[in-house]
Image (tube, rainbow, N blue to C red):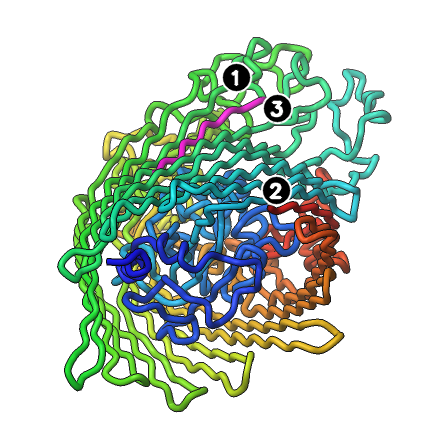
Amino acid sequence: MKAASLASASLLSLTAGTAFAQERAQPETAEAARVDDIIVTGVRGAPRTAIESPTPIDVFNAEQLQQGAQTGVFESVRYLVPSFNLPARSGGGSSTVIATGALRGLNPDQTLVLVNGKRRHRTALINSVSTLYNGSVGVDLNMIPSSAIARVEVLRDGAAAQYGSDAVAGVINVMLNSSAQGGSVSVAHGRNFDRNDGRYVNLDANLGLALGEDGFLNLSYSFMDRGASNRAERIADSVRLYPLLPDGSLDPREAIIDRMVTTNYGTMPQVSNVFGANAAYTVSNELELYAFGTYGQRKSDLSWTWRPPTNITVLPEIAPDGLRTLTVIKDKDYEAVVGARGALAGWDWDLSTGYGSNVSDWENYSLNASLGPSSPRHFYIGQLASAEWVNALDVTRGFTLENAGELQVSFGLQHRWENYTIEQGDEASWIQGDYVRPPGQPFAGQPLPPGTQSTPGFRPEDEADVSRNNYSVYGELGWNPTERFYLGGAVRYENFDDSAGDTTIYKISSRYELNDWAALRASFNTGFRAPSLAQQAYSATTSQLRDIRGTGVAESLRLKNFQVNSPEAIALGAKPLTPEMSENLSVGFTLTPFSNFVLTFDAYQIDVADRIAVTTTFSPIDTRLSADGVTTIGEQLQAIMVANGLSPDVSGQYYTNAIDTRTRGFDVVATYKYGTVGFGDFDFSFGYNQNETEITGIIDNPPELAALGDIVIFDRSKQAALTESLPKSKISLNGGWTLDRLSANLRLTRFGEYTTRHSSNPALDREIEAAWITDLQVNYDVTDAVRLTLGANNIFNVYPTKIQEPSADLGNGMYSGLAPFGFTGGSWFVRAAYKW
């Protein structure tokens, strides 16, 4: 078989596999991605263009992903894909670190991420305290060097039958650079308009090398250093920050303390170094070996709310002017995939194995007040770690049927091993000391809460080490009975050796060309998402001093995220987690009525049953009357714990299969290219998404809780996070222009309105208005090798709707953390690039 045939065979064998040989045969260029680009996601067999796909697919090349001053891949996709949502800050804690977004109003872990067609491992960080996406464990694409990416293909349709668990809303496939020659390096710097903060520096480098005459090695490196930004305001002079002096007068330091007390109301600092490699070598006409991998290190600073000297946890011997606490998260992320592909007896095959891991170490700089003035100031909080090992065989072959067109037959096997661990922190980071405030100090004689401030360490009872195996087999047929009609079908069986169990799912898709410029397409598929190991095993504990028993004496109340299989969770009605199941219907059409113009429309309905969500908090200090009209709900909860031989001084929540939802929407995407003589070439695109989710069912309270009275297992804020807290629509308008060495790009994005709801008080609900964001970039090619870029994001410095006035005590809280474009205003950037 000729080398070109091997390249074609490699493409045919993709089937959740790679396409290196095809990439080498058709190297990426700097031209904008076109609708006639060859795609390798969602199809098997002969090469197919995006417009010929039976399901909607968007294709973006490296240049499109680098437009603007984005600091990662997901940030770019946010503006390129109408149905992709990526809030700037979906909540507190680690949700400010994880770069995860979602398609079509669903959660990040309901979109499958592939790299070169191979499943990418998950992050170890779980969105544990976020408003949006709570409990989701996604893939962090920012741990892939942006300089390594040749293009990204986004399949906006369920594809679990083709690719396996998680592909409920769609698939994002990142194709790596396979160039065997040349290279590039670029440096970018930018800052916010307001306060001149949020500065960032990006460095990207790529180098292509030939491996003999029949192979390549492509190396990449990306560095990112992002500084902090802050939009808090100075608090009033009338706010007292220090305890009164013994004579009742004000502390004189009130007059000189800096009243910009909040410094973390914006983006958090982050530094990352990420490396990538991609290689392939043709051994013979029937065999090619390939390998690719990434390695990344990232340090993220999470600054927490400032604690004034009047706070009981602020020890005057250590922090006389208040306490600023800092959590540092250090991530190490790596993945390596090796494989072989070729042809045997007319069948094209791809055999691969890949291992990926994300290890997240947490440190804290604060104090444990219960240990007194001798408390350490630096603590190891603990470690979260996630690992996946995937082995896959994919086989395909095309047949020409006599008088019945073309048939593609594909099948494959996959084994996946997963592991998730939690490692405890230093004892000083969680222990309850016996220090009490001495006479002469405020709060004299009172005990102090245990653990480090803001982020207590993981306790011994929080530790976990869980693993599971998954085995799957699939088959797929793609039939073209005529040149104008395509019919596809896939079926997949998956088996997990834990509570996820086994399931069989399927997909049917079709496309029919009405004429040379109009076609109809439709698909129906069932899908599933197995509960992540983190959702099953994650546990974290904080503590407060509260009057638990109503005696007037403060005791330590533990606040926990219960592991699903823990005795406490089981006592409160928790059951083993099972997969989320989905049904996805999509119908649409494509139009190419004249040259260089394409319009696609796709409507969809996604029903997801048994979605995993976190319950409300069950607390022993809940003072509402229980069903008996005598005792409180808190007392009844304590009784349940005692009856099960457990401590009554614990308050907590757990993850459970709880909610059924229906998501309906549609996407419109149009592109048009127009060339002129003397005035340059123009490239226009338009995207629109309308998306709404409703809750169609919520499980009844488990028997353990049903008899207690007015307990709402999922409060209104948790329900709104699924249905109302994302923009209901998004419009993307993009215009590109090129004339000789000068080019420019103007992008307008409208993020629709959304709602934030309070857990219990409707008066605190807020409606966030729609907003237009305008980005502009101008490029000048000094030579064929050197390009200079000047640009700005959000050039009109738009801020989201204020939800309230600044907090009197802290000067923050004016904006919703769900704002899709953040709340730090506009920014400018410059970039210089050199290629050879």
Q: Residue at x 20, y 42 (%)?
A: 469
Residue range in magenta is: 356-365
Mark 1 or 2 closer to N-term?
2
**Which residue type carries mark 2?**
Val
Q: Is residue 203 left or right of residue 212?
A: right
On-image quarter of the N terminus:
bottom left
Magenta: main secondary structure equals strand
For badge 1, the amino acid type reads Ser
Query: Which residue in the structure is indicated by mark 3?
Result: 312
Secondary element at tag 1: helix
Against 101, is 750 above or below?
below
Give coordinates of residue 773: x percent, y percent.
Answer: 68, 62
| Residue depth check, mark 2 versus mark 3: number of the one nearer the observer | 2
Picture quadrant where residue 161 is located:
bottom left
Q: Residue furthest bottom?
A: 515
- Number of numbered tags placed on the structure image: 3
Q: Answer above or below: position of 632 versus 298.
A: below
Whole-angstrom CA distance, mark 2 to mark 3, is: 52 Å
